[in-house]
Amino acid sequence: MKNSNSYKWLSEQADRYFPDRQLYFRTNGDVRFISVSQKVQIFCSVLLVGCFIWVVVASYNYININQIIGEKDGEVTVASQNYQELETQYNQLRNDIQKSASALEQRQQYIQQVLDEENIEIEVPNEVPTDDSEYTIDGDTENADQEARNRVRGEDLDQIYVDLKRIEMAQNNSVSMLIEKVDNRLAFLSEVLEKAGIVQDEMLANAESLPSNGAQGGPFIGIEGGINEQIVDSSSFDELYNKRSHLADLEMAIAYLPIATPPEKYYISSKFGMRRDPITRKWANHKGLDMAGWHKTPIRTGGPGVVTRAGRNGSFGLFIEIDHGNGFLSKYGHLSQLKVKKGEKVTENQLIGLMGSTGRSVGTHLHYEIWFNGEPIDPLKVLKAANDVQKIKQQEYDS
């Protein structure tokens, strides 16, 4: 019943809006007509409505698709920019790794050089990773999706960072041990100089004009930044280098100190400093050490140098002066005979004269002086420190 009513209503509406129609055409006085049935009208209407709907839908889809494509293009552009930024950051990290690894490599070479010089054998890292070429995954990462590729890259960099930090820590441990060794030597050397009555700073100032005693290795190249802005710390290496340079300067400077005893057999008849003059019996400053012995006892040099005076010198009688370098002079007075001439180069313990009593003297002895930077120092202190100085010269001391 319901369907019948609906059909009746549709039929009525069709009769109302689509009655049979005739279309008249007049041509040259002739009138013709075409009958358009209800079904044709309904078909054409449906066709027109369908075309209209298709045009609307097609236009909407065209506009919507273009909008979607535009959004996708924007997303691709942003993704491309992000990718380029990631590539730039990744390449920068690679460069930082290579710089940091290069610094660690140089420092490793320096550590090994120091260890070889000190005859120390310890286990130190012998390989420093220079890039991420050793850290790969199975498959072709070029064809992997970008997220996976970036994840792999991040894991590679993390592994390299861990390896570099491990090497850095091992190197720092080695450096700390070497610094302690150098500190002990510096303390020993400073104590020896103090006992010998020598001002360390003055001796080092003179040493600046001396020829170098050999390369110690250049200072370490610090890295600005590095991985996480902290991968390579140069402070401990700088400390080691500076202390070793300071130690080398001291060792080079003290090597010029005359430490050999001029006469082999003697006894001390008068010490350095204030004393009563043996002739006038008045108090006077004695600038040397009187070493008494047999007549013509051989007198030898306290150290290598150049003879700057050889001959008579007033109250000193037959006299010899030797310049040892770095501000050190040695003087020998009251000799009975000279064995060298002015300008002659001499070696340590070389025979230069014979003991006597020439000049202002009351008995056979050697008046021996050691001067540093234009001031006399106590020869007895130098002779007492001779064994320690010899250890320093031969690099046979540690504390």
Image (spheres, helix red, strand yellow):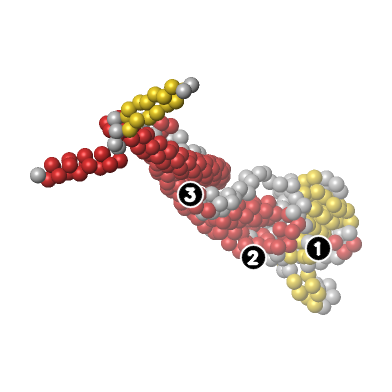
Could you tell me residue 391's position as x and y percent?
59, 53
Q: Which mark is residue 374?
A: 1
Dot 1 or dot 2: first in sequence order is 2
- Looking at the image, is 199 positioned above or below residue 5? below
Locate residue 359: give its quadrant: bottom right
Q: Is residue 198 left or right of residue 45?
A: right
Q: Which mark is residue 150?
A: none
Please tell me which residue is depicted at 73% across the width and 68% down the height of the picture: 272
The residue closer to the viewer here, 5 or 82, is 5
Q: Secondary structure at mark 1?
A: loop
Disc 2 residue type (three-letter):
Lys
**Mark 1 Cα-neighbour bin, 10 Å: few <14, some 14–19, many ≥20:** few
Q: Is residue 40 left or right of residue 169?
A: left
Dot 3 or dot 2: first in sequence order is 3
Please tell me which residue is depicted at 64% across the width and 56% down the height of the picture: 246
- How far apart in space, not on screen, are marks 1 and 2 (Cα)? 19 Å
Q: Check disc 2 and report the residue beneath it.
A: 195
